[in-house]
Image: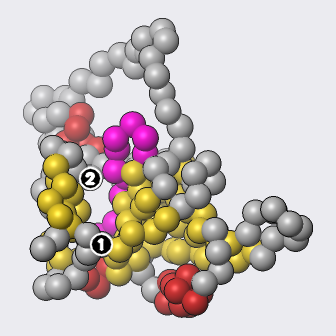
Amino acid sequence: MAKLELGNLDWPNGKVNPSGIVPIAYRIPRENITAWPTISDDPTVATTIGALVNYVGDFVLATGKKWETVYSTQGKGKVTFEPVGELDATMYVNKGTLSYPDITDEVRAFAKMAANGDYVYIVHTPNGRYHVIGNESYRVKSAVSGDSGDAPGSAKGVTINIECSDVTPLPCYKGELATAAGTLDIETGVFTPAV
């Protein structure tokens, strides 16, 4: 069995490296996913670095179901990962923070549904990566909290803190993303509007 070679972690001087997340993320109840794309969890089987950290294929959704968009105020959202577990059993907790700028009926209804629900999220970063926070084997915790703000012009709205255990730190998705507005092929960047 050939061992996957990681190579150097070089960084070119002056390379642009945007931070944060794009203001639109995606969510779907797990029950609306009928099949998951694949990812290699075994470094002795993966033939490329990409196969070890990126999903291959598409999420297959139940008939008529689509990913829903979630707006997040620019500069208030992020994704992170951290190791968890004992030696020889270490995994990751993938986390995301989204910030919605109001306390509407819709967002409060989502808070109520998500409290004990199980949603899967895709969060887009400015460098073109679409990170999945969700796992076929582990539930996602969506902690939604609201704040009215305390003075004119102060921040208000809802913070959505997402976390999920995974064997892969912030896996990326490159397949199709079907929404009510149309379908985005993430790999090619081609968006086909809904008819």
Give the CA distance from mark 1 to mark 2: 14 Å
Query: Circle 2: is it few (<14), some (14-19), or many (20+) Cα within 10 Å?
Result: many
**Residue 168, percent across and down?**
36, 50
- Residue at 64% x, 75% y: name it: 102
Q: Is residue 9 magenta?
A: no
On screen, residue 155 above or below 33:
above
Q: Residue at x 12, y 74 (%)?
A: 195
User: Residue 187, relative to residue 178: is it above or below?
Assistant: above
Q: Which residue is mark 2?
A: 173
Please count the marks in the image: 2
Tell me the SS state at disc 2.
loop
The residue mark sitting in front, 1 or 2, is 1
Q: Main SS type for the magenta part?
A: loop
Write down the region rendered in magenta.
Answer: 125-136
Q: Look at label 2 and name its amino acid.
A: Tyr
Q: Secondary structure at mark 1?
A: loop
Which residue type carries mark 1? Trp
In the displayed structure, does residue 120 sit left or right of residue 176? right
Does 102 sit left or right of 180 as displayed? right
Residue pointed to by mark 1: 67
Does residue 37 appear anywhere in the picture?
Answer: no
The image quadrant where one finds the N terminus is top left
Q: State the image coordinates of residue 120 (x, y, percent, origin top left).
A: 37, 71
Residue displayed at 75% across by 75% down: 147
